Amino acid sequence: MSLIRVVSYNIHKGRSALGRRESLNELRLGLYGLRPDLVFLQEVQGRNESKSLLDAQHESLAAALRLDVAYGRNAIRSHTDHGNALLSRYPILEHENQDISDHRLEQRGLLHARIEVGDRAVHCFVVHLGLFAGSRTRQILALTDRIQRLVPEGDPILVAGDFNDWGDRLAPLFVQQLGLYEVFSHAPRTQGGELPRLRDSVRRLRNALRGLPNGATVLERTNQLGMEGAGRLLPPPRTFPAVFPWFRLDRIYQRGFAVRSARVLRGREWARLSDHSPLLAELELP
């Protein structure tokens, strides 16, 4: 049995919520402190010819976290491009970025990667859907078609990203057609959990660089309930805007996993990094 820590995060091209300050260095430290195994990233800048510090963000983050990486370029400008990325502690066997743009005003892509967890194949999909309801429905149909064609029945699946689905109207499509469930709907009841703080992430990284054991600093108190805990149905979390979350835009859907915990990371320090709040889920692969 494998315990997998999954993060989904729209990083706003490495800029703060209002775009007034660069946040990539702090974001790197924040992600490091979460100890993720899989990171589903949206609005990642793959190329920036004007500011080298913002160039190849997927590679910079992957190197800091010591993870494998796949990047799907979607929006192409004269001096920049951005898209989705998957960072993985497990080998990425193959990946493909499918263009699911619905009109010329929005460039959207579907990054599909097949990773290997132990001796099992897991299919990961990083998505950032359109702003219009009709576009989102057609993009989900494209995702459904791809899964039905290319994913063997019974293979575990993770679909995560920015769905722009504030009305939660797409969930029935996932459940009815693919057997995918949003992690918060199956998360066991948790109490008293404390999320990692950004300054603790900085301290953890400093300890690692100095060769100190991770236990030298207490970073977080997380609930360790097993799946025998009482379940409860929860709505997807409010994740946007990060400074005062009101809209339920971000999701992690899964098939074939047991959900051990699921949370949205809030607080002033996280709100300084992006206009979205990140999601963190602990999943068990039997």
Image (spheres, helix red, strand yellow):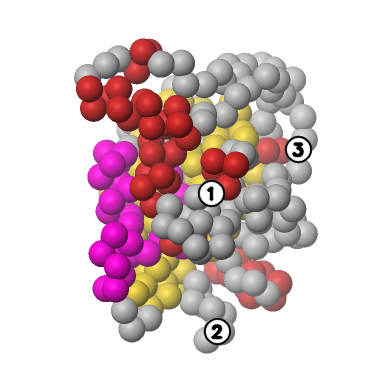
* Segment tinted magenta in the rendering: 39-68
Asked if residue 62 is among those painted magenta in the image, a careful observer would answer yes
Quickly name the residue at label 3. 234
Relative image position of residue 127 (x, y in whole percent): 51, 60
Residue at 55 percent across and 35 percent down: it is 281
Which amino acid type corresponds to the residue marked 1 in the rendered image?
Arg
- Residue 272 image label: 1
The residue closer to the viewer here, 115 or 213, is: 213
Residue at 68 percent across and 38 percent down: it is 184
Snapshot quadrant of residue 68: top left
Label 1 vs label 2: CA separation? 28 Å
The residue closer to the viewer here, 150 or 242, is: 242
- Residue 54 image label: none
Task: Tell me if residue 4 comes above or below residue 7 in the rendering.
Answer: above
Task: Tell me if residue 104 comes above or below residue 209 in the rendering.
Answer: below
Label 3 vs label 2: CA separation? 34 Å
